[in-house]
Amino acid sequence: MKRIKILGIAVMMMLISSLLGVEYSALAEKQFHVKNGGFEEPPNYKTKSVKWIQNVIKKGWDLGEGPEAIMIPGWVYNVNTGPAKVRLIEGTSGKEVNSGEKCLMVQSDKSAQIYNRAKGYAGCEYSFSLYVRGKGQAQVTLYQYDKKNGREIFLNSIRIWRKDVSNEWEKYDGVLKTTHPEAKTFLFALTTKGEVYIDDVILDRTGNVLSD
Ligand SMILES: [Ca+2]
């Protein structure tokens, strides 16, 4: 019975989407996938004189040589961690980068975190995968938030895995669940220590359909 109801909702959403001229698959992709997980989107270069970038730099983050800072579309530097050096690496697929033409390098003596924002609902299940190489450790953490009056309220965090990374590109994958009953959005965060290269971060919904 529940299945029929869920199917009904899905069909209805597809109809509404097609009426609005929005591809249902594109909508789903927007909501559930890590944005720019392969680091192929052109970076935004912002002048370092911008106040909030100065704040990031003051916290010890090295965002590139010269007067411009590298901002990676889809990703946010967590300035409460670090300090860190961040570079967009260009190279050959299978060598410097895992696929495409670019990957991200984060270097930190302590630990530094970057994150991507996604919509999540209580009880949703996602599979994730990413490729890393370098020297140090990498960790995936899920931060869950409720949303009230347009404000995000932190609920909890769940560490999914932590691994030592090696010189060769290695794929890591796992499952994460938005377990908190109030969860509306979450952050998919990568924490690294040492010199870690990251590419092809993918998040896929595998479990329940959304129940907004
Ligand atoms: Ca790439």
Image (spheres, rainbow, N blue to C red):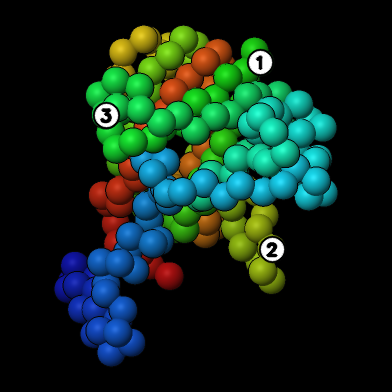
Q: Which residue is mark 1?
A: 110
Marking on residue 152 = none
What's the amino acid at mark 3?
Answer: Ser
Please tell me which residue is depicted at 52% across the width and 59% down the height of the picture: 184
Q: Is residue 60 above or below residue 78?
A: above
Which one is closest to the eye, mark 2 or mark 1?
Answer: 1
> Who is closer to the viewer here, 68 or 152?
68
Q: Which residue is mark 3?
A: 93
Question: Is residue 102 left or right of 7 when viewed as pictured?
Answer: right
> How far apart in space, not on screen, are marks 1 and 3 (Cα)?
29 Å
Q: Decide: marks 1, 3 in contact (CB < 8 A)?
A: no
Q: Position of residue 126 (x, y in %)?
A: 33, 46
> Who is closer to the viewer here, 133 or 144?
133
Q: Position of residue 183 (x, y in %)?
A: 52, 55
> How far apart in space, not on screen, are marks 2 and 1 (Cα)?
30 Å
Residue 38 sits in which quadrant?
A: top left
